[in-house]
């Protein structure tokens, strides 16, 4: 059976839409502040990534003396992979914190 649309329903829909917009803006602001830092398992390389997983910085933190280019490359790749995964986790956490109560916004499920 079709639902009758009245002024109160329209006002609630507009209010709900505004609450969603506010949460979306809060999410955007929070994600802009997210930064994850991860080290390779051998502590040779540190990678900093943002919430989207974009690498912002790669720093060689250990001594490369006696290391091969293959070892250094492996450490860089491991740290980048871990940073990307950590960024995804952080992004999901921020999203859940921001929209966790989404179903409660309008009272409807």
Image (cartoon, rainbow, N blue to C red):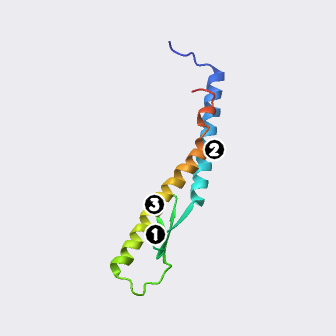
CA–CA distance in space, label 3 to label 2: 27 Å
Mark 1: give few (<14), some (14-19) or many (20+) Cα within 10 Å.
few
N-terminal-most mark, 2 or 1 = 2
Labels 3 & 1 near each other (Cβ < 8 A): no
Q: Residues within 10 Å of mark 2 (few under 14, many from 20)?
A: few
Asked whether residue 52 is in view, the answer is no
Name the side, left or right, on which 39 lies relative to 97. Answer: left
**Residue of label 1:** 41
Q: Circle 3: is it few (<14), some (14-19), or many (20+) Cα within 10 Å?
A: many
Mark whose residue sits in front, 3 or 2: 3
Q: Quadrant of the C terminus?
A: top right
Mark 1 falls on what kind of element?
A: loop
Given residues 35 and 20, the one toward you in this image is 35
* Vertical side of 18 occupied by 2: above or below: above
Identify the element where label 2 is drawn: helix
In this rendering, the answer to whether 109 lies above or below 18 is above
Q: Which mark is residue 84?
A: 3
Q: Write down the residue under mark 2.
A: 22
Contact check, label 2 and label 1, Cβ < 8 Å? no
Percent position of residue 10, x then y: 62, 26
**Residue 5 rendering spot, x and y as whole percentages:** 58, 19
Q: Earlier in the sequence, mark 3 or mark 1?
A: 1
Residue 79: percent from left, percent from top? 44, 68
Which residue does the image show at 35% across and 82% down from the upper left?
68
């Amino acid at each position: 059976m079709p639902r009758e649309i009245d002024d109160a329903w329209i006002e609630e829909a507009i209010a709900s839409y505004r609450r969603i917009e506010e949460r979306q803006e809060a999410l955007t602001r929070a994600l802009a502040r997210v930064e994850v830092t991860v080290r390779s398992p051998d502590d040779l390389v540190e990678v900093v990534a943002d919430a989207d997983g974009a690498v912002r910085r790669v720093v060689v933190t250990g001594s490369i003396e006696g290391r091969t280019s293959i070892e250094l490359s492996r450490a860089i790749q491991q740290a980048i992979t871990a940073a990307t995964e950590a960024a995804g986790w952080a992004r999901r956490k921020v999203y859940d914190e921001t929209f966790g109560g989404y179903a409660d916004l309008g009272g409807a499920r």
